[in-house]
Image (cartoon, grey):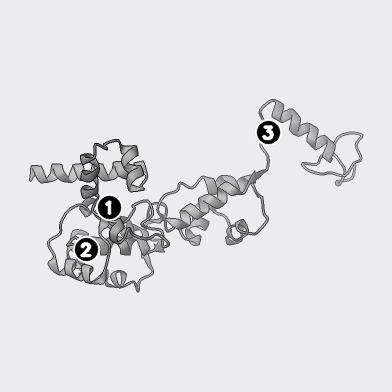
């Protein structure tokens, strides 16, 4: 029997897939589907494309994607190829196996990642009174000017471990007032957004924009306005503020935690 012929005994038709001709392969697929055991070697491309876009939006670079999946660079380039509809099951499973989390969570601590989110967090903290000297002291860094290039925008990358430290600090301090009037005045002069002007789900996305001008007022004030109107349901608040319910819940939890901390002080 020729290697190019169907492997079924007595069939000389050309092999189509898995060593079977088109007719026998179709029969084989139908049989497995009937028993719920068929898994195609091809998968629709839409879900992997969307997952990669989600990951890139939270700062995961191409190098990190390669490290996380073990897939070559060319595989990710082919995802955006016009007209392509399928990827291999292996590629599908490797890409979809990556959780949609920020780069500083996914990457190894020593890996360099995009610094956009870290710079935004540092600038936002400066806006509420936590400047470089206060941040470096809280992180145990001797060099008080360590983050100068991040504030200025010159540093395009940062180690994932350091980005994680800044993100954790940001969550702890974003609803509190810092001690530095100099940092606050400088941030106001430069027009840096306040912490709550950033959606924490998109702060690491270079394409994301802060809530500006008349569309923004501190979350606590907007919440009080809605409460005065009798609106207390989280889903309705989220709809009024054009935010995800999960984001509203997190902000409410942070406000509650900050209030408890002030009461205990």
Horizontal arrangement in the rendering, residue 261 relative to residue 49 (left or right): left
| Residue at the limit of the structure toward the left, as seen here | 265
Residue that carries the numbered disc 3 in the rendered image: 38
Residue 11 sits in which quadrant?
Answer: top right
Judging by the rendered image, the residue that carries numbered circle 1 is 168
**Up/down of 146 relative to 95, above or below:** below
Q: Which residue is mark 2?
A: 127
Please provide percent x and percent y for residue 79.
Answer: 61, 56
Dots 2 and 3: beta carbons under 8 Å?
no
Between residue 246 and residue 218, name the one nearer to us: 218
SS label for mark 1: helix
Mark 1–mark 2 distance (CA, rounded to whole Å): 17 Å
Comparing 115 with 72, the one in front is 115
The residue carrying pointer 3 sits among few (fewer than 14), some (14 to 19) or many (20 or more) residues within 10 Å by Cα, namely few
Residue 17's disc is none
Q: Earlier in the sequence, mark 1 or mark 2?
A: 2
Q: In this orientation, does residue 165 appear?
A: no
Q: Earlier in the sequence, mark 3 or mark 1?
A: 3
Q: Residue at x 77, y 41 (%)?
A: 18
Q: Earlier in the sequence, mark 2 or mark 3?
A: 3
The percent position of residue 137, horizontal first and vertical second, equals 18, 62
Q: Are marks 1 and 2 in contact (CB under 8 Å)?
A: no
Are the two marked residues, 3 and 1, in contact with CB atoms closer than 8 angstroms? Answer: no
Left or right of 264 in this view: 197: right
- Crowding around mark 2 (Cα neighbors within 10 Å: few <14, some 14 to 19, many 20+) is many
Q: CA distance from mark 2 to mark 3?
A: 57 Å
| Kind of element beneath mark 2 | helix
Residue at the farthest front position: 229
Which residue: 28% across, 56% down? 216
| Quadrant for the N terminus in the image | top right
């Amino acid at each position: 029997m020729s290697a190019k012929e169907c492997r079924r005994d007595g069939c000389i038709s050309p092999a189509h897939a898995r060593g079977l001709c088109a007719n026998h392969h179709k029969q084989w697929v139908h049989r497995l589907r009937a028993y719920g055991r068929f898994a195609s070697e091809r998968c629709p491309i839409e879900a992997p494309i969307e997952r990669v876009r989600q990951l890139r939006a939270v700062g995961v670079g191409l190098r990190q994607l390669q490290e996380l999946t073990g897939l070559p660079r060319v595989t990710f380039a082919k995802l955006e190829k016009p007209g392509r509809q399928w990827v291999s099951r292996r590629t599908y499973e490797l890409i979809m196996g990556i959780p949609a989390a920020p780069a500083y969570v996914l990457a190894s601590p020593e890996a360099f990642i995009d610094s956009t989110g870290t710079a935004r967090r540092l600038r936002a903290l400066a806006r509420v009174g936590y400047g470089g000297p206060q941040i470096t002291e809280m992180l145990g860094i001797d060099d008080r000017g360590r983050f100068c290039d991040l504030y200025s925008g010159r540093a395009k990358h940062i180690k994932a471990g350091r980005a994680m430290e800044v993100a954790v600090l940001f969550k702890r301090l974003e609803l509190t007032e810092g001690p530095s009037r100099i940092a606050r005045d400088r941030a106001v002069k430069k027009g840096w957004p306040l912490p709550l002007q950033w959606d924490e789900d998109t702060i690491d996305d270079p394409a994301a924009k802060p809530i500006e001008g008349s569309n923004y007022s501190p979350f606590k004030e907007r919440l009080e306005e809605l409460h005065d109107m009798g609106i207390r349901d989280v889903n309705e608040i989220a709809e009024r503020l054009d935010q995800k319910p999960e984001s509203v819940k997190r902000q409410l939890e942070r406000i509650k935690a900050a209030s408890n901390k002030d009461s205990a002080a």
